[in-house]
Amino acid sequence: MKKFLKYINSIPFPFSMKHYQVFGDKALDSPQSWDALRLNHPHFSISPNREEWLSASELLVKKDGQDGGLIERARGVTELLKREGIERVFSLGVGGAALEYQMKKMMPGVKIVCSDYSTVTVETLKKVFLKCDEIVFFDLMKDDWVAANKKYLGHNALCLMYRIDASMSDGEWHSIFKTLHGAGVEKVLYIPTGMLTVLSVYNRKWREIKWFFKGVKKRWSGYVRTKKRFEQYWRGLYGQEELALGGLRSFFLTRKD
């Protein structure tokens, strides 16, 4: 019975729903909106002061994407890198780059290139993440993946997608994985922010109802999904191995010929 209830709670079919937050005046749907958030919101901002940034990266200050499981998550990622003989990591949409900082700290020999499509993020990280091998501007929807694969990836390399799942629609994610496959990207580690369950859908909708009656303005900030929906994006293109990394269910993907 326990196994059955867990199966039902997991929502065993593809499903996506909109995700809302209560900060800011605009939806988080452009580089400009993220630039504004990085500059003005204390939970999402990236300090240009290196000591303050290090405090956040060591989890002494709470920031977006830097939960209590982050250090264990970084340890899990570095164990995967060692297991697979991976020497280079190209990480997308890094935000404050706390995960990448911990990875570099644990495995200094691995080459890590951090990227983001927010110019504020890129310029700030260049000032504080001094041990990162390279920090570049990259828009995974618009920029050249063939050139990126040649320059930053190739053999013995990993494309890391950490907590960037909410920002793109289902159609966009299908297109992204088709593009990655066509560009020859061999290995991807996809770590979603979370996965929908029956209970989480209920909690989210109940929260929205409370916001409505309190007159709180909610802002669209992306999508949340079930495991089955994620798996649709790379079906037929990449084989998958499901992992648990610091409390987050994740997917290690290997390109199919």
Image (cartoon, rainbow, N blue to C red):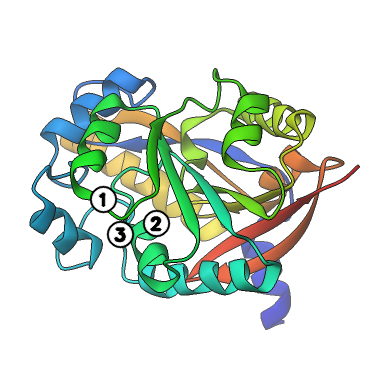
Check disc 1: other Cα within 10 Å, few if <14, some if 14-19, many if 20+.
many
Q: Secondary structure at mark 3?
A: loop
Q: How many marks?
A: 3
- Frontmost residue, 80 versus 21: 80
Going by the image, does 58 lie left or right of 225?
left
Can you identify the residue that label 3 sits on? 66
Q: Quadrant of residue 144?
A: top right
Q: Is residue 47 above or below residue 28?
A: below
Query: Picture coordinates of residue 254 (x, y %)?
Result: 77, 52
Which amino acid, by three-letter code, is at mark 3? Gln
Query: Picture coordinates of residue 38 (x, y %)?
Result: 20, 34
Are circles 1 and 3 on residues that touch, CB within 8 Å?
Answer: no
Q: Earlier in the sequence, mark 2 or mark 1?
A: 2
Q: Earlier in the sequence, mark 2 or mark 3?
A: 3
Going by the image, does 239 lie left or right of 250?
right
Q: Is residue 100 above or below residue 220?
A: below
Question: Which residue appears at 55% of the width and 17% of the height?
Answer: 142
Q: Nearer the viewer, mark 2 or mark 3?
A: 2
Q: Nearer the viewer, mark 1 or mark 3?
A: 1
Which amino acid, by three-letter code, is at mark 2? Glu
